[in-house]
Structure formats: structure tokens, C-alpha cells
Image (tube, helix red, strand yellow):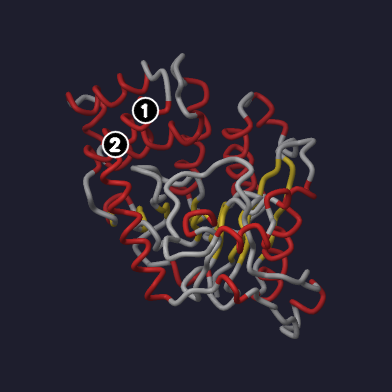
Amino acid sequence: SIDVVINIVLTEGSDKNHYQTALNSVECYAALHGYQLRIEFDSKFKECSRHRDKFFRRHCHTHFLMQRELPENAIVLFIDADVGVVNPNKLIEEFLEPDFDIYLYNRFYNWEFAAQYLIKNNERGRKWIKRWADMEFTLPDSVHGTDNGALHILMMHYLAPDSTNSRLGRMCKTIWEHSRDAWDLFGTQACTRVVIGERNEFHDHHVKIFAKGAGWARDAWLLKSHWSDEDFMLHSIKDERLRAEDVLEESHGHNLVKTTDRLGYPLSFPVIERLNISHCATGEVRWTMDRRLRISNTLRAREFGRLTTLKLKEQ
């Protein structure tokens, strides 16, 4: 059997209570399926203290965790603390294929990879995560987008090694190095995706990139907190944003699509009762779901199609 580890790295000094609801669902899910769950602060490995940027420090932490404490060939799912599980019947193993060691997914937001990943704890996986973490030390003096901006340059060079010297590859890097705002950053992402191409599977490099809506997680606000049985994990689940009644008030009408997130915009998380972790391990736990915002898989697919079209028009 495969060792599966769910890895959440918190910034030293941050308050876990901000993510209570999301973490409770992940704890229960891990216990239910016998997955190892690591929720640790980023101060654990002294070697990572040289990272001033907390986002890169998390990847350094993951690298040392893999190198020192996790079994060889274990599968590590790195997620943010504000990711919650909404469908405990889905298994992480469902996303794995023999040919791939590194998995990313596309966000609906423009041309962006999410900075969350599934990775195999082998030499290739460890080298990749270290290479990403170390990009902090060669960041340009620009609006570079920290680890997410760096991820796009990393993947361009990783999946298209010739791009380090190609005209287009150099142009992408120049856009990044002179980026002044979110639009320039978007230009960088779009440029790298032109170099990488439309493919989702890169067998030579053992990388798979899941299409929009097909990865393990998505932003909760995309469909105004509506969910279907196809959903596995939802992102942006911070306790201060959870106001189900406000969401219901705003949910009248047929338009479920949101193309941008506003800070403070209310969200709803469908798991409505706190899960008893001791019951999760025995499988006796009951996941009580708020069905008022449940939609069919067909409607979910249709709205995602509409969202993709809207995003393309914006560009």
C-alpha cells in the first residue's frame, strides 16, 4: 500500500483557530482513511530560517520533512491551512498514476497554477521542491508574486528546458523581472503557458497538471459556496468568512459564477457540524452536510464551462 501524507505548514506565530473548520475536516478525513497528517510550524527545521519569505519557507520545510522524516516513495499532499474536505469518500490515490511524481492543478483564475501540489518522496520530487524553495534567493526586484510567480518560471524551465535560451522563454523571464503589478504578473503566467503548451501530461518529466476543475481542490467562492458531489476539497475556508445565512441571501437567481474574490465576501462550508476525530478513525462519524447550497454535478460542470468562457473574454 502507498503511504499518503497530508502536509500543512503554518507560519510560526499564526493562530490555528482561524482555520478551525477546515482543519477539523482534514483531520477527520485523514483519520478516516489512515493517512498521516502533518500540521507543523515553519520554524521546525533550522535550515529553513534563511528563507525570509514565508511562502518559500513552507516549501523548504516540506523538502526537509520528505528528506528526514517521511518514507521513501510516500505521496505528499501539500495544502494550505484554509483547505477543507467536503467529500470524504474521495481518495487521494484516485489522483495518482504510475508515470507521474509531481502533480499540480490549474486554477480557474486566468493562467495560474495553484501553489499546492501532490509529490512523490523520491529523488526527483525532493529536487523539484528544493529548486522551487531556493528560487527565493534569485527573485527579481519586481512585483514577482512570491512562490506562485516563481512556480510558473520554474515549470517553464522544468518542462521546456530549452526555454532558458529560447527567445520566447527569455521574454517571459524579462516580463517577470520588470513586473510592476498584477497585470504584468498575469502576462508572465500567460507567457510561460505559451512556452509549456496546452498539454496536461509530461511523461518525460513525470509531471501531470490537472485541468481547471479536475484537481483535488478549488476556490469555494467560484460558485458562491455551492458544491456538488464532484467536489473534494474547497479552498479559502477561513472561519471569519463563514456566514452561511449571508451566502443564502445572496444566492437567489441562476447566476452562480463569481470571477473574482473580494476579501470579506461571505462563504459557507457545507460540513455543518464539528467532526469528532475519535469517531473518524473508526468510520462511525457522520458528515452532516448543509444541502441548501448543493447543486448537481451537471450544473457544476455547466457553470465551470461558463466560468472558463468568462475568464477567456476578460483576457
Residue tagged by mark 2?
Answer: 190
Quadrant (top left/top right/bottom left/bottom right) for the C terminus: top left
Q: Nearer the viewer, mark 1 or mark 2?
A: 1
Is residue 284 at all visible to an observer of this figure?
Answer: yes
Residue 212 occupies quadrant: bottom left
Percent from the top left, x then y, of residue 54?
Answer: 63, 32
Percent from the top left, x then y, of residue 279?
Answer: 79, 79
Residue 204 vs residue 251, the one in the foreground? 251
Tell me what residue is drawn at x 31 percent, y 54 percent: 308
Image check: 200 left or right of 256?
Answer: left
Specify few, some or many for label 1: CA neighbours under 10 Å numbering under 14, 14-19, or 20 or more: few
What mark, if any, has residue 3 been given in the picture? Answer: none
Percent from the top left, x then y, of residue 24?
Answer: 74, 63
Specify few, some or many for label 2: CA neighbours under 10 Å numbering under 14, 14-19, or 20 or more: some
Residue tagged by mark 1?
Answer: 183
Which element carries disc 1, helix, strand or loop?
helix
Residue 148 vs residue 269, the one in the foreground? 269
Image check: 31 left or right of 93?
Answer: right
Residue most extreme to the left? 167
Asked if the residues shown at circle 1 and circle 2 are in contact, with their CB atoms under 8 angstroms apart, the answer is no
User: Is 174 drawn above or below residue 254 in the view shown?
Assistant: above
> Marks 1/2: CA distance?
10 Å
Percent from the top left, x then y, of residue 155?
Answer: 35, 39
Image check: 249 left or right of 46?
Answer: left
Tell me what residue is drawn at x 21 percent, y 45 percent: 197
Badge 1 amino acid? Trp
Badge 2 amino acid? Ala
Quadrant (top left/top right/bottom left/bottom right) for the N terminus: bottom right
Tell me what residue is drawn at x 43 percent, y 31 percent: 150
Tell me what residue is drawn at x 39 percent, y 51 percent: 108
